[in-house]
Image (spheres, rainbow, N blue to C red):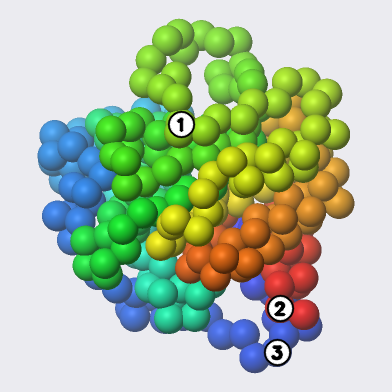
Amino acid sequence: MDRSQKIFAELSEDFTKLQTVDLETLPKLSWEDIKLAHDLDFISRLFDQDLAVLEVQHCYEVTQKDLISGINQKPLWKMPEDVLFQCRGTYMAALSALKNESSFFLGGGMHHAMRFAGRGFCLLNDIVIAARKLQLDHGIKRCLIIDVDAHKGDGTTQITQHDDSIFTLSLHMKNAWPIDGSLGPGPWDLPSDLDIEFGIGEESLYLEKLTAALAQVDIAGFGFAFIVLGADAWEHDELKSTQSLKLNSDQMLARDQLIESTLAQFKIKRTYVMGGGYGERAHEPYVNFLKSLLN
Ligand SMILES: [Zn+2]
């Protein structure tokens, strides 16, 4: 069971009316829509079976042997289609938030995907695609992206670098990925509109800095917000590269509730997406927050 299924199963115990959505009912996204966030060159590589395999290998850091069974028992060249489903889910959640003010998608948050390629387990940037679809088709003017995943939302930042209609706020570990710094300088260093970094041992400053960041952003001026609610900032996350930020369960819940109460105060329409979160217990912070919302 992956973390989304675990979240749904746990919530269903308390909230018996919860239902899953039939995947067929997800709004369609064309590859034209994907162009809202990605280069034509990159998109065309995803259409070519051989080149798509290379793109997927690079993005998911898998080796040749994974080609035999593939991820989820599928050949790697089929991955882009699966990832497109994630993008459709994020967009569906956003459409739901237009009607209901708020929504939470048990998926999405592929914030490392850059305009020119996927990377860091993120092939396509569902957040920017959905934000720009809302702007194009639903009259949303300014979008706010609050990214509290342990890693910097560098793909989102790179894609929206010259776009004043999308504001990126990212709270993340100062030194994270790759841990040895071997990547060198690159587009991942581009600044978000507001970056808040945390060094080792600075967890106790997290809520204070988040509060200050939210106060610094003119929340009322946005028509929509996406929140990349990465659970990998949690102390029990199992990914090696998240070990320099270890918020405890209370801090995680306070983080999520602070974002929610701030956006709700200004009635900002908003969609939460999951972002990163790794290991057996990765579902737990989401369950805690969602239970607090649903109760
Ligand atoms: Zn992450």
> Could one spot residue 118 in this view of the protein?
no
Q: Is residue 293 left or right of residue 191?
A: right
Observer-side mark, 2 or 3, equals 2
Query: Alpha carbon of mark 1 to alpha carbon of mark 3: how far?
Result: 40 Å
- Which quadrant is the N terminus positioned in? bottom right
Q: Which mark is residue 279?
A: none
- At x 36%, y 54%, the residue is 142
- At x 85%, y 34%, the residue is 204
Q: Is residue 204 left or right of residue 68?
A: right
Amino acid type at circle 2 is Leu
Residue located beneath label 3 in the image: 16
Q: Counting residues from the N terminus, which is met first, the one under dot 1 or under dot 3? A: 3
Query: Alpha carbon of mark 1 to alpha carbon of mark 2: how far?
Result: 32 Å
Q: Position of residue 202 (x, y in %)?
A: 80, 26
Residue located beneath label 1 in the image: 192
Residue located beneath label 2 in the image: 294
Kind of element beneath mark 1: loop
Q: Counting residues from the N terminus, which is met first, the one under dot 1 or under dot 2? A: 1
In the figure, 59 relative to 31: above or below? above
Q: Position of residue 5 (x, y in %)?
A: 62, 67
